[in-house]
Amino acid sequence: MTSSSIAAVAAKPSSPAEHELPLRLWALFASLYTTQSLSLMFIVVTLVAILRSQGVSLEQISLIYMLGMIWPLKCLWAPLVDRIGAARRSHYKGWLLATQGSMVVVLVAMGTLDVVEDFQHIYLLCALIALLSATQDIAADGLACSLLPPASRGRGNGIQIAGGLLGTLLGAGVLLMCYPFLGWAGCTWILAAVMAVSLLQLLLFDEPQRRTPALTYGLLFARCVSFWRQPRSFYWLCVLMVYPIGGALGYALLTPILVDAGWSLPNIGLVVNVFGCLLGIAAALGSGLLIQRIGRRRAMVLAAWLQIPGVAILALPVLGYVDIASVTLAVGLYFFCYNPAATVLATLMMDRASAHSPATDYSLQFSVNQVFGMGMIGVGTALAGSLGYLAVLALAAIASALATLLASFYSEGPDT
């Protein structure tokens, strides 16, 4: 197969017959997507809070946040995940076993260290976890693209987004609240035990043999270029970049506003990382089922429109309404209105993944989307300092309206 022929591969990956997938497969996907988010959010939220409470400098803490940039770079080694092991029956299962098992071992080792005195060693282990979780995500996405038929992708990506939110709830909410009682070792070992559940599920999972021939390394890396030469790729690139901007700018305002209003960190975590995530989980799962009922295009347009009230409701805390009722309403509606867009976009990214290189194709799209999403959170925070919260909220509303306009031109997908 030549590099030109791979560029022409259809977006539909090979998949099992269009029938109801077994419950154990859905449970496996839910577990994998939850644990990968759980480990990362534990590092960038809970660990940061622990370090700061122990008097660690902001300069050292900023190094932790830099670990989050490993994920957007995962497209650089996604071709290796697609290629290595392609001749074996358990292609993606092998990667998942290796990464999941390694994370369990690393977390157990972290629990034996002192969180302050052994910061350098802990930081290196955290970098390893970020790399392992990103690679696990590549393999999980490749497995999902290979096994989920088009009719099941909405539900599958609803589970993916919900799993990420559940991981945030547990890693950035529950474990942080339990730290005073469990200590550092207790938190890391509980985290390792939760990771081990996915490991057991993987051992019992029998991955079907890939139905497409393995590509060479050259063709897989050439795919990183040829993917963006497909029809309407420029439009799709614009969607990936613009869709997350409004929600990211809005999210950038939440914590600073509440901190300025005198909210305690535990209360912020409870409302944002627990209550907000619970509503986000409900919205993601509901959106996944709705995609199958109303089709890709209508779901994309509806999800884009929903982002507008989700951003607009943040005007309550921006304008000074920071009582518990107003903030809970604003956070709840924001999470409920933003996550359908994330679910729909993940489904459409899966539709555009080739059967020959599913992990590579999905990672290429995800990396663009996440770079803009994470980048806009940083930009929004910086702009809030110079322009004010209200100006950033206005920019978020404009970006959400632009995403709605782009969505109206969508005309691809297996069921549009």
Image (cartoon, rainbow, N blue to C red):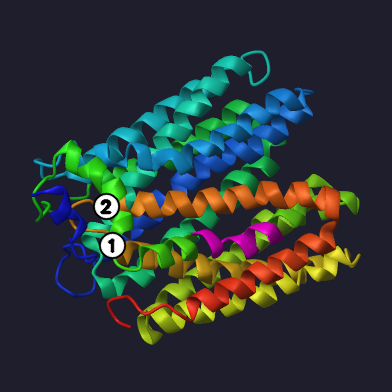
Task: Report if residue 55 is visible in the image.
Answer: yes
Q: Is residue 249 above or below residue 174?
A: below
Residue 369 in percent (x, y) is at: 49, 55
The residue that disc 2 covers is: 226
Mark 1 falls on what kind of element? loop
Quadrant in the picture for the C terminus: bottom left
The residue that disc 1 covers is: 230
Please report the residue visible at 45 percent of the width from the left and 46 percent of the height from the top: 35
Tag 1 near tag 2, CB within 8 Å: yes
- Horizontal side of 156 relative to 390 (left or right) equals left
Q: Mark 2: which amino acid?
A: Ser
Question: What secondary structure prevails in the magenta region?
Answer: helix
Q: Mark 1: which amino acid?
A: Gln
Please report the residue visible at 16 percent of the width from the left and 44 percent of the height from the top: 90
Please report the residue visible at 30 percent of the width from the left and 64 percent of the height from the top: 352
- Horizontal side of 92 relative to 377 (left or right) equals left
Total of numbered circles in the picture? 2
Magenta residues, start to end: 241-250
Q: CA distance from mark 1 to mark 2?
A: 7 Å
Question: To which quarter of the image does residue 45 belong?
Answer: top right
Mark 2 falls on what kind of element? helix
Residue nearest the observer in this picture, 113 or 257: 257
Residue nearest the observer in this picture, 390 or 169: 390
Residue nearest the observer in this picture, 190 or 105: 105
Residue 54 in percent (x, y) is at: 76, 24
Q: Is residue 392 above or below residue 406?
A: above
Binning the other alpha carbons within 10 Å of mark 2 as few (below 14), some (14 to 19) or many (20 upward) gives some
Residue 367 in percent (x, y) is at: 44, 48
Please report the residue visible at 24 percent of the width from the left and 44 percent of the height from the top: 222
